[in-house]
Image (tube, rainbow, N blue to C red):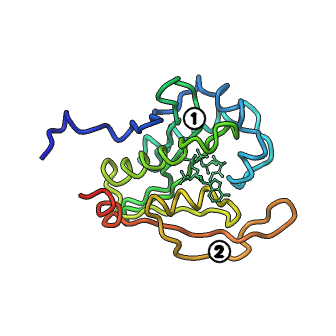
């Protein structure tokens, strides 16, 4: 068995590292948060103010204290630049389940491997640190790159929430995807 000190931190990937979000991050959170291409995938595209982002940071800090949500800043390993946010939320201590989310805020940073790396870290945190049994996500069926990443990392499509989301004048389906701890362990040779 590898000694604990020689194991790689689950918070550090090949391209990104995940760290806690601070109130001082609000200007970074604001820089691209109101970008339509980013927000349209997250189900909330009405622009937010800095004050709303500050309140959000305070809310997630409270939820973190209660063990309900774990939300991290995604940081570029090489440049230390802020890239986006990823999360394990609605943590259920009886079922050991949680919901996952990820966003790389600046569209110019998309398709560079950051999202995949962040989700890989998040799965390690979910299963190896928080000892979750199941991680679920909902994704709009038109978000092809997000669905591609989730499948590549072991998520299975388990259902469709028909016309669950009303987006820019049209109802769209949401895909429900999940991954179980055994599946994660098998994929990671554990
Ligand atoms: C979804 C998101 C997190 C992906 O992050 P990213 O850093 O761009 O992703 P990566 O660069 O790691 O990987 C993108 C993958 O999608 C693939 N891809 C790109 N466009 C695609 C398309 N139209 N169809 C299928 N796959 C596509 C890329 O080839 C790449 O896969 P590969 O590494 O196997 O070649 C990012 O686009 C994002 O933040 N979008 C806005 C918020 C959002 O929609 N979040 C998801 C909510 S469920």
Q: Position of residue 167 (x, y in %)?
A: 80, 61
Q: Position of residue 104 (x, y in %)?
A: 61, 41
Q: Is residue 91 left or right of residue 53?
A: left
Query: Label 1's element?
Result: helix
Q: Is residue 91 left or right of residue 170?
A: left
Quarter of the picture containing the C terminus is: bottom left
Q: Position of residue 23 (x, y in %)?
A: 58, 26
As drawn, the label of residue 171 is: none
Using a 10 Å C-alpha cutoff, classify the residue at mark 2 as few (fewer than 14 neighbours), some (14 to 19) or many (20 or more). some
Furthest-right residue in view? 169
Provide the residue designation for mark 1.
58
- Identify the residue shown where x is 67% and y is 63%: 140
- In front: mark 2 or mark 1? 2
Above or below: residue 119 compared with residue 74: below
Q: 105 or 52, which is in the foreground? A: 105
- Identify the residue shown where x is 53% and y is 23%: 79
Q: 56 or 82, which is in the foreground? A: 82
- Identify the residue shown where x is 31% and y is 56%: 188
As drawn, the label of residue 161 is: 2
Instruction: Please tell me how many numbered marks the rendered image carries.
Output: 2
Query: Label 2's element?
Result: strand
Above or below: residue 54 compared with residue 102: above
Q: Position of residue 133 (x, y in %)?
A: 35, 63
Using a 10 Å C-alpha cutoff, classify the residue at mark 1 as few (fewer than 14 neighbours), some (14 to 19) or many (20 or more). some
Q: 50 or 9, which is in the foreground? A: 9
Within the image, what quadrant is residue 171 found in? bottom right
- Identify the residue shown where x is 49% and y is 44%: 118
Above or below: residue 160 compared with residue 129: below
């Amino acid at each position: 068995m590898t000694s604990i000190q020689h194991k790689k931190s689950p918070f550090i990937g090949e391209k990104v590292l995940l760290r806690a979000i601070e109130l001082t991050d609000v200007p970074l959170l604001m820089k691209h948060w109101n970008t339509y291409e980013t927000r349209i995938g997250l189900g909330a595209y009405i622009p937010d103010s800095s004050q709303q982002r500050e309140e959000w940071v305070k809310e997630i800090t409270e939820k973190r204290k209660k063990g309900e949500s774990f939300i991290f800043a995604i940081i570029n390993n090489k440049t230390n630049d802020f890239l986006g946010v990823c999360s394990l939320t609605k943590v259920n201590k009886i079922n050991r389940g949680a919901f996952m989310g990820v966003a790389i805020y600046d569209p110019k940073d998309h398709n560079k491997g950051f999202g995949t790396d962040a989700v890989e870290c998040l799965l390690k945190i979910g299963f190896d640190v928080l000892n979750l049994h199941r991680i679920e996500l909902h994704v709009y069926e038109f978000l092809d790159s997000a669905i591609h990443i989730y499948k590549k990392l072991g998520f299975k499509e388990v259902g469709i929430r028909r016309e669950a989301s009303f987006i820019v004048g049209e109802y769209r389906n949401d895909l429900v995807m999940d991954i179980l701890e055994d599946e994660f362990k098998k994929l990671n040779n554990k």
